[in-house]
Amino acid sequence: RLNSFNIEGQNKNLLKLLLSSNNIYDLDWNSVRFERLNTLNLDHNKIQRIKKFYFSNIKSLSNLKLNHNRISSIHRESFLNLNHLNELDLSHNCLFEINKYLFSNQLNLRILDLSFNLIKVIDTNQFKQLNELKASNNLIENFHLRSGSKISSINLENNPLLKNLFLNNSFFYYLNLNNNKRINLRHSLININRIQNLYISKIKFNIMENELHSIIENLI
């Protein structure tokens, strides 16, 4: 197993690099250029911090997996040059917060997985083209999705502190609010006109049965 990863030079042909399930705690590839690398798997390692410009020499990267590490901090410019990034997995880490500018330059990011962390706040205004957000099993207290957002799939399951939920999108393909006992369902769904997959199990409803039926009917 690798403890650190150091590589030098220029690689014009490598498309996929899998470094999963090692003991990697640090990366040093500032002296290397990957011209065509599109997939990088670093899951199940021991990385604790994502430093500034960590991936600056892998501008072609579209799929990045950092799940199942020990990441507790990410510099706001860590992903700055990843203009082609399409899918990012940061699940199962130790993140307490997400800088509100972290993804502001990721115009092609479509899928983001932040589940199983300790995050309290997610600023969704930074997501320009994101379609799918996975944020289950965190400590999110307030979640506000702006009007006009491209996000149509959200998993907020098992956020025990979630109380204020404002969803201003008119359409959702998938919405999972399971096991969130503090949210006000009436206020959370009021702006949604149509939804295809709704999960609201293990919620302590504070509305009457006929109100629930009315809310669901408005979503069909």
Image (cartoon, rainbow, N blue to C red):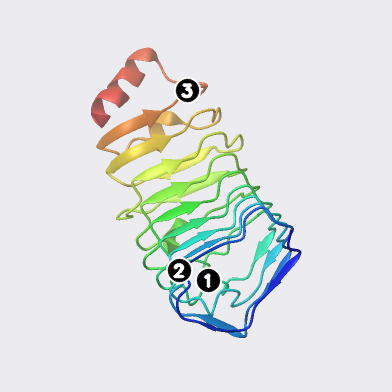
**Would you say residue 191 is visible in this rendering?**
no
In depth, the one of 214 and 103 nearer the eye is 103
Q: Position of residue 148 (x, y in %)?
A: 29, 55
Dot 3 falls on a residue whose secondary structure is loop
Mark toward the start of the polypeptide (1 vs 2)? 2
User: Separation of disc 2 and disc 3 at Cα?
Assistant: 42 Å
**Is label 1 in contact with label 3 (beta carbons under 8 Å)?**
no
Mark toward the start of the polypeptide (1 vs 3)? 1
Residue ID at (25%, 24%): 217
Residue type, mark 1 in image:
Phe
The circle drawn on residue 201 is 3
Dot 1 falls on a residue whose secondary structure is loop
Residue tagged by mark 1? 79
User: Separation of disc 1 and disc 2 at Cα?
Assistant: 19 Å
Residue type, mark 3 in image:
Ser
Residue type, mark 2 in image:
Leu
Which quarter shows the N terminus? bottom right
Mark toward the start of the polypeptide (2 vs 3)? 2
Residue tagged by mark 2? 15
- Quadrant assignment, res 173: top left
